[in-house]
Amino acid sequence: MDGTYDIAIIGGGINGCGIARDAAGRGLFVYLCEQADLASGTSSASTKLIHGGLRYLEHLEFRLVREALMEREVLWRMAPHIIWPLRFVLPYQAGLRPAWLLRLGLFLYDHLGGRDLLPPTSTLDLTRDAAGQPLKAGQYTFGFEYSDCWVDDARLVILNARDAADRGATIRTRTKAVAADRNADLWRLTTVDCRTGSAETVQARILINAAGPWVADVLATTRQRHAPASIRLVQGSHIVIPRLYAHDRCYIFQNPDKRIIFAIPYESDFTLIGTTERDYVGDPGQVKTTPDDVEYLCQAANRYFSTAITPAEVVWTFSGVRPLYDDGASEAQAATRDYVLDLDEAGAPMLSIFGGKITTHRRLALRVLDKLDRYLPASTRARRNWSGQTPLPGGDFPVQGFAALVKDIVRDYPWLGAQQSHRLARAYGTRARAILDGATSWSSLGRDFGNGLTEVEVTYLMREEWAEEAADVLWRRSKLGLRLSAAQTMMLQSFMVQHREEFLSR
Ligand SMILES: Cc1cc2nc3c(=O)[nH]c(=O)nc-3n(C[C@H](O)[C@H](O)[C@H](O)COP(=O)(O)OP(=O)(O)OC[C@H]3O[C@@H](n4cnc5c(N)ncnc54)[C@H](O)[C@@H]3O)c2cc1C
C-alpha cells in the first residue's frame, strides 16, 4: 500500500458512510472526512422512516418507491435493533383524496415488491378501533392501516461508519475538505482539522462528493469546470410533544394543501410530528425551526386529534435540509426524491450525489460503486452483493429476536432493570454486552450522568463511535437530550472534554 486511497469520500451522512461501508467491505482502501460529527447534517433530522413513500406514487416515482419498498426488509434484517416495523393509520377525510385512490395507492404499495414479513394493508373501522379514539369524534369513521419501518437515523449512519472502520476504512470526523486538485490519475484532497486548524493532504484515485446539502459548496472547492446537476434545498421541520396517545401505531394525516403529516410514537414518552416542506436558502448548517413551522404542524395535527396541541407544549424541535436533485418542479413537495449520480471523468474521477433517502442509502452505495466499476480492481466484483447480507454492528440477531435479546440482558445483568436493558439493546443490539462486559453492579458502570447514561457507555461512545461532545451523545448516539437537565449536560460535557485526548489518536 503506497498510502494512496482507492476512494476518498467527503461527507459523513448516511450516503457517505453507506458508501464507505460498501467499499471497505469489498476490500477497497477508503478514507472519509466529515466536517462536524457523523450524522450532524440532514441524516439526523429525518422523519426516521424506512419507507417506500406512499406519497411519491402520486408523482409516479415508481422506480424509487419500488426500490425503497424492497429495502425495508433488507435493512430491517441488517439492523433489527435500530429498525423495526410500524403500522400507519391513514384516516379517510372527505373532500381530500378519494377512498378509491387511497385503496389503489395502498394496493400498489403492498404489491410493488419486497414485502415478505411486513403485514399487508387492512381497512379500519375507526368508530371501534383504538386508533379512532384520539381522533375528533364523529369526523373520522374509517381509514386504512399499512406497514413501513422506523429507524434511528443517526445511529444508522454511525453503525455504517463503525462497520466501515471495522473493515479498514479511515474515518475522520471534525475534518473539513477545503480543496481538491487532480491530475489524470489522482486526487489530492486537502483537509483541515476543525479542532486544531492543522491541514493534511491525502491522495486518492477516486473522489466522492457525498456532502448532501453542501454538495455544491464542495464542488466549488474542487474548481472543476464540469457543469453538474443542480441541487434544490428544501427545509423540513419536526416538533416533539409529550406522548399524545397510548397505542403504538403512527398516523399519516392528509392536509388540505395536499401535503401529509406524520404523528409517530417517539422515545416512549413523546410524539413526533412532522414535517414541513419549503425551499431553503442559506447555510444548511444554520437551519432552524421557525415559529411558523411549529404553528403549521400544530394546526395540521389539530385538524385530526381531539386533544388540541399548542406551541407551548413543544419540548423539542429539529429541522433538516433535504438535498434534492433539482428537476424543475414548481413546488418543493413535488421535487423528485430520487437521486442522481453525477460522474465527472475529466481526469481522476469524481462522483457527486444529488438527493437520496435514508431508506435507499444502501442501494445508492451499490449504484455508486457500479458506476465506478471500471476504475475499481476487478477483484472487488466478487463482493458486489455483500452489503445487504451482512448485519450492521450489533444487528446479528433475528428480526423477531429483540425481546429475547432484552430478556438475556435482564437475566445476565438483573440490577440493570428492564428499562435500561431495553434502552441499551435498542441502541447497541448484541454490542450492548461490549459496554456491560465485566460489570457486576450499577456502581461498577462508573459515573452516572442521569437517566441511565453511565461512564462506561460514554467512554464506549468516545472509543468506538467518534463521540467528542455532549451533543454527540445526547442527540445523535441517543436521544437522552430529551431527558437530561442542563446541569447533567454540563457534567457530561466536562467529562468528555477532560477525556477527549485519550480517544482522538484512535
Ligand atoms: C425533514 C426531512 C425528513 C426526511 N425524512 C426521511 C425519511 O423519513 N426517510 C428517509 O428515507 N429519508 C428521509 N429524509 C431524507 C434523508 O434524511 C436525506 O436524504 C439524507 O439524510 C441525506 O443524506 P446525505 O448523506 O446525503 O446528507 P447529510 O446527512 O447532510 O450528510 C452530508 C455531510 O457532509 C458533511 N460535509 C459537508 N461539506 C463538507 C466538507 N467540505 N468536508 C467534510 N464534510 C462535509 C456535512 O457536515 C454532512 O454531515 C428526510 C429529510 C428531511 C430533511
Image: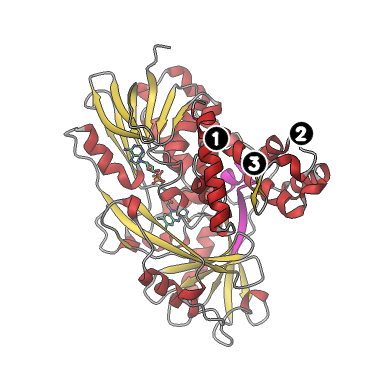
- Image location (x, y in percent) of residue 119: 64, 58
Drawn side of residue 93 relative to residue 404, left or right: left
Magenta segment boundaries in residue numbering: 73-88
User: Mark 2 against mark 3, which lies toward the viewer?
Assistant: 3
Magenta region includes residue 112: no
User: Would residue 385 be visible to someone looking at this image?
Assistant: no
Q: Is residue 196 above or below residue 321?
A: above
Residue bearing mark 3? 455
Q: How many neighbours does mark 3 have within 10 angstroms: few (below 14), some (14-19), or many (20 or more)?
A: many
Please give the name of the residue rendered at 46% of the width and 71% of the height, measured from the top-left corner.
101
Mark 2 / mark 3, whichever is N-terminal: 2
* Residue under the image location 57 percent in, 75 percent down: 143
Kindly report the distance in space between the C-alpha atoms of the residues bearing marks 2 and 3.
14 Å
Which color scheme did the rendering employ for the protein?
secondary structure
Q: Is mark 2 on a helix, strand or loop?
A: loop
Is 323 left or right of 459, judged from the image as shown? left
Q: Mark 2 points at which residue?
A: 438
In this view, 149 is above or below 100 = above
Q: Which of marks 2 and 1 is nearer the N terminus?
A: 2
Q: Residue furthest left?
A: 225
Mark 1 sits near ligand 1, with its Cβ under 8 Å away: no
Which residue does the numbered mark 1 point to in the structure image?
499
